[in-house]
Amino acid sequence: MTTTKSEALFARAQELLPGGVNSPVRAFKSVGGTPRFIDRANGAIVTDADGNEMIDYVLSWGPMVLGHAHPEVVTALQQAVTQGTSYGAPTAIENKLAELVIDTVPSIEMIRFVNSGTEACMSALRLARAYTGRDKIIKFAGCYHGHADMLLVQAGSGVATFGLPDSPGVPGGTTNNTLVAPFNDLEAVRELFKQYPDEIAGAIVEPIAANMGFVMPDEDYLHDLSELCHEHGAVFILDEVMTGFRVALGGAQQAFDLDPDITCLGKVIGGGLPVGAYAGKREIMQKVAPAGDMYQAGTLSGNPLAMTAGLMTIRVLEHEDNFDKISAQTTKLADGMRAISKKLDIPMQVGHAGTMLGSYFLKEAGAKITDFATAKQYADTEFYGKFFHAMMAEGVYFAPSQFEAGFVSLAHTDAHIEKTLTAAETVLTQLTQ
Ligand SMILES: *Cc1c(COP(=O)(O)O)cnc(C)c1O
């Protein structure tokens, strides 16, 4: 397998773009080596610049739930592009995608489209603050909500604490209203509400913490968190940028029977084009300008091409049993990984829900990852790096980091799943010999 073209492109890219990429994880820092430059993709397969084909479980980090270049999405986009690419004025297709999302996601009554998940979460916080007239926000260690200043806080320890910024350039002043609690720890949240009565605008959480690997919420945790927010006059914000249309058609909120006040969306709703959205209860959303006084705007928001890709993607996803088919393939892959872990006696924690999954290699047999602290403590990132590269050599493309989830699409057939599992068994047998 040659990678000379990717290597040359990466060398050049590093002179042009910081680190050679436009988003950090793409640079393979946590697994080492040279990132593959992707030339094209179709169905479940990505092809790199040297012509190597790989079964893709990154899927643009989630959006490509139908697989790449799905014919119905491509045809719709080809049609749309001939009618102009942006007007900066309202269009009928924005209504259509809004209707579809509102019909599909249980808690959503109104929606505002933006251009990324970052924008969605940033705006959702502004809305929670505007609606409650309070400043403080609770987030959970290890949860990612995009790169807006006040959300770039993870907390270095498992103890609930004032947020210290994770990145230079983020002034302490923008994060000292960000309170951090460990995921799956309700008591820590209770403490924060006690410590700051009438000051907390809301809590924002990933229903499945899938930006620190794949951590499921404990039973009732999210439900109780939501109740705790409401008891204290705060809003419950569910960040479904990744889980929306992935954990269930109606998102994790449908799967876990939750009723968030505000939902953040992204990834799948853009079908591979840049879209995000924040959405929720009518009474809260009416606060957004120009219906209300909370300002938020976007030159390209509701862009007709992006709306078209999102609309066609969700329509096809909702067609007959397409969603269940993808979920079944995901289960097959996750169960297969569990079986290999058992057979080869390699300690792993494999999680899956709907059409997404995540596997940790554990440093200790019997260890259980339930939050960011245990993820950092027990996840064997070095072993993952070896696994990742060996799988890529076998033609399987997983995320280039132990702390990212994996995704399955409608284009993943039994043959793809079987080939993946055979490769995993071969690779893991070799790595543990
Ligand atoms: C990807 C992601 C975001 C950020 O979305 P971008 O489109 O990358 O800005 C926010 N929240 C969650 C849960 C995500 O997975």
Image: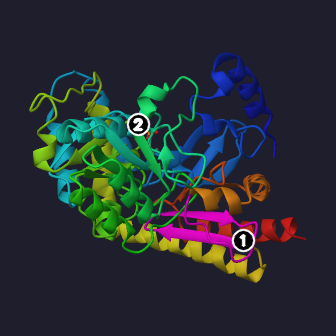
358 in magenta: yes
Mark 2, ligand 1, within 8 Å: the answer is yes
Counting other residues with Cα less than 10 Å from the Cα at mark 1, is it few (<14), some (14-19), or many (20 or more)?
some
Q: Is residue 50 above or below residue 321?
A: above
Q: Residue at x 68, y 26 (%)?
A: 19
Kindly give the residue lying farthest to the right in the view shown: 433
Amino acid on which disc 1 is placed: Thr
Q: Quadrant of residue 319 in the image?
A: bottom left
390 in magenta: no
Residues drawn in magenta = 347-371
Q: Earlier in the sequence, mark 2 or mark 1?
A: 2
Read off the residue under disc 2.
118
Q: Quadrant of residue 340 in the image?
A: bottom right
* The label number, if any, that marks residue 422 in the structure image: 1
- Label 2: state its secondary structure: helix
* Residue 105 in sight from this viewpoint: no
Give how far across and how far down residue 83 sits, in percent: 24, 26
Amino acid on which disc 2 is placed: Thr
Q: Nearer the viewer, residue 175 or 387?
A: 175
Left or right: 235 in relation to 384: left
